[in-house]
Amino acid sequence: MAAHGPDVEVLCRACVAHFPDIQGVGVAVMTGTAQQVRYASDPVSERVEQLQLLLGEGPCRDAFDMGGPVLADDLQAAVWRERWPAFAGAALQAGARALFALPLRAGTLGVGVLDLYRDSPGALAGQELADALDFADAVTDLLLAEALPNGDVSGDYGDGAGSYLAQRAVVHQATGMVSVQLEAGVEEAFARLRAYAFAAEHELDAVAGEVVARRLRFDQLDGGPGRGAGDRDGAR
């Protein structure tokens, strides 16, 4: 942080530049039941983060739950395909061959996960792993600083927590609305919201915004992404 300043985006760009074999990095801010992409350095990293959010599986989720690094040195290996049957193939298709998830923790408090990807197989070990863990510690400190009452929450998506908090609130609000529409529990409603976004190839935040704006109702879907009762009425 002394070298790169108190900014998550700048620090993550420095992290990518530090490792010659790492193509991108993503940061997910997480709780026990919620997950939000805080930063992605490139389209592949963004897709990898979104896939883990939408599918509910992957190294990010495992690293957060276990509180330790998950180092997948080749996503084509059977061990990772069996562990993440939906995510592994989708991540490979997105352009990630190796993925390393480092938990962001302050003592026993889990803040999120730092994900680094490679487009070729290979391990992250030794001094490189030690350096990556140092970057993860620094990112943790910055995320905690953003959460303070006097922290900078006025920036854009990559520059502060304000936009992130707003997006998380929209997802939570949409989940509650879907829960009421389907007369289902919150966990099932969130799963349906994620599944719809994945099938429609939309961002979760965008789908949540449609629900909150009352342009999309889950109790009026006809089984196809993007179509509700209003679409059917219009077609007739």
Image (cartoon, rainbow, N blue to C red):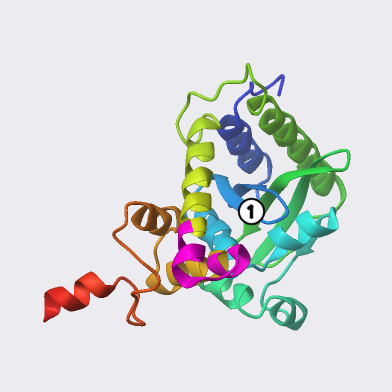
Q: Is residue 235 magenta?
A: no
Residue 204 screen position, x and y as percent: 46, 58
Q: Main secondary structure of the magenta part?
A: helix
Quarter of the figure with the N terminus: top right
Quadrant of the image for the C terminus? bottom left
Assign a secondary structure to mark 1: loop
Frontmost residue, 171 versus 163: 171
Q: Is residue 15 above or below residue 42?
A: above
Position of residue 213 relative to residue 48, above or below, is above
Q: Quadrant of residue 88?
A: bottom right
Picture residue at 79% right of the left edge, 40% below the top: 131
Residue for point 40% across, 68% down = 201
Q: Which residue carries the number 1 mark?
A: 34
Image coordinates of residue 212 in percent, x first then y, are 38, 52
Is residue 18 visible from the viewing direction of this image?
Answer: yes
Based on the picture, tell me whether residue 186 belongs to the magenta stretch. Answer: yes
Which stretch is magenta? 177-189
In the rendered image, which quarter is residue 97 located in? bottom right
Task: Determine the image quadrant of residue 196.
Answer: bottom left
Q: Position of residue 10 (x, y in %)?
A: 57, 30
Q: Position of residue 36 (x, y in %)?
A: 57, 49
